[in-house]
Image: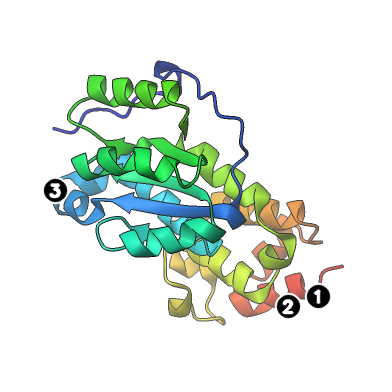
Amino acid sequence: MLYPMPKKIQFAPSLSKWQLSSTQSVLVLVGLQNLRAQQGMQETALMENLIQLSNKAKALEIPVVDLLQGMQQLGEYATSHPQLIFAGQITPMLRQILPHLNSVTEQICVVDDAILLANQEQHIQWVDSLTTQGFHHMNSYSVTRLWSLSAPTEYVLSAKGILLAVAEQLDMEALEIDPLQDLRGYGLDSVAMVSLVGLWRANGANIRYEDLLDNPNLNSLLKILLNSD
């Protein structure tokens, strides 16, 4: 049985001072296929956090690398995206390469509520040991929030950025969304609407919750936002 994800208060505070940025990040997923194959995993907080991270990365065009399949790709990204954000199953391979990656970039972060070890005690001990070695750690909420806050306004309010933000909230592929379909029919609820409006207003868009409520399809939404003063 999967153990409960530890809470923030159970970890030693991260001592790293660098600031997470969406334009500098790579999300590195470890053992995701193995995790998906485990019975009952889909209903866990761990998988919810992994999906949240993956969806946010897609929405902001943050590169996502599977560690087992993309070591060379990861090395190439590290030159232009020096912030390596790790989540997934903590394997012996990952433990072995982390010190080597630290010689390439000092901006390494582990998402402390989106990783899996043998049990909760080992989970907490491993994150605490990373802290003493100078690695950063933070929870999935903090990572996705900082990614959103650091995303360039010109991207967030572009047609592509708007489409991917809506797709993130719907947990759908962007191309699956019919631009004339009422987004509520896809499952866009009031909480998701408030989140989207807050994101766009924070980036300077002149849009209210009522505007989205009255124009709940992608085509109308794009017209409002792309013409927003």
Crowdedness near tag 3: few (<14), some (14–19) or many (≥20) residues, C-alpha within 10 Å: few
The residue singled out by tag 3 in the image is 38
Q: Earlier in the sequence, mark 3 or mark 1?
A: 3
Res 132 visible: yes
Vertical order, 188 against 95 (above or below): below
Q: CA distance from mark 1 to mark 2?
A: 6 Å
Which image quadrant: the C terminus?
Answer: bottom right
Report the residue at 22% width, 44% height from top: 93
Report the residue at 31% width, 40% height from top: 46
Q: CA distance from mark 2 to mark 3?
A: 44 Å
Label 2 near label 1: C-beta < 8 Å?
yes
* Secondary element at tag 3: loop
> Which residue is more in the foreground, 71 or 32?
71
The residue singled out by tag 1 in the image is 227
Is 164 on the left or on the right of 123, as rendered?
right
Report the residue at 38% width, 64% height from top: 73
Outermost right residue: 229
Res 188 visible: no
Is 53 on the left or on the right of 2, as rendered?
right
Identified by mark 2, the residue type is Lys
Report the residue at 20% width, 53% height from top: 36
Vertical order, 89 against 218 (above or below): above
Identified by mark 1, the residue type is Asn
Residue 201 picture location, percent across and down: 75, 55
